[in-house]
Image: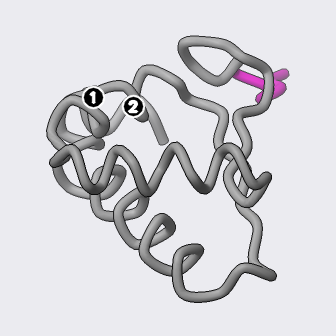
Amino acid sequence: PGWIKTFDDYFRSQTSSIITSVVEALAKDTKRKFIWAEISYFEWWWREQSVEKQQLAKKLLQNGQLEFVTGGWVQPDEANTE
């Protein structure tokens, strides 16, 4: 849940490694696809990558293996409470 860790904590403890793993897995198998919603996390990850890793991510976007959905900076909270 988002109230347990800060944005920074989530990025450092989970999100950065998730994006890196996804990019590496997609590069190994062109049949795989992945969608991503939180552009804010991806942008942070992007800034920390080498030019080579950025080029790989661009290639995955161009060939449709990696796709951004919603186009938002963050994912909307879709939880319901009573």
Q: How many marks?
A: 2
Labelled pair 2, 1 in contact (Cβ < 8 Å): yes
- The answer to which quarter of the image holds residue 7 is top left
Q: Tag 2, which secondary structure?
A: helix
Q: Residues within 10 Å of mark 1 (few under 14, many from 20)?
A: some
> In this view of the protein, which residue sits in the foreground, 37 or 56?
56
State how far apart marks 2 and 1 are (Cα).
5 Å
In the rendered image, residue 34, in percent from the top left (x then y), is placed at: 71, 60
Q: Mark 1 points at which residue?
A: 44
Q: Is residue 77 above or below residue 19?
A: above
Q: Residue 41 carries which label?
A: 2
Check if residue 1 falls in the magenta segment: no
Determine the residue positioned at 66% across, 33% down: 37
The amino acid type found where label 1 is placed reads Trp
Check if residue 80 falls in the magenta segment: yes
Which region of the structure is painted magenta? Answer: 77-82
Determine the residue positioned at 16% across, 48% down: 50
Looking at the image, residue 72 sits to the left or right of residue 16; the answer is: right
Q: In this view, does 79 lie above or below 18?
A: above
Determine the residue positioned at 69% across, 21% down: 77
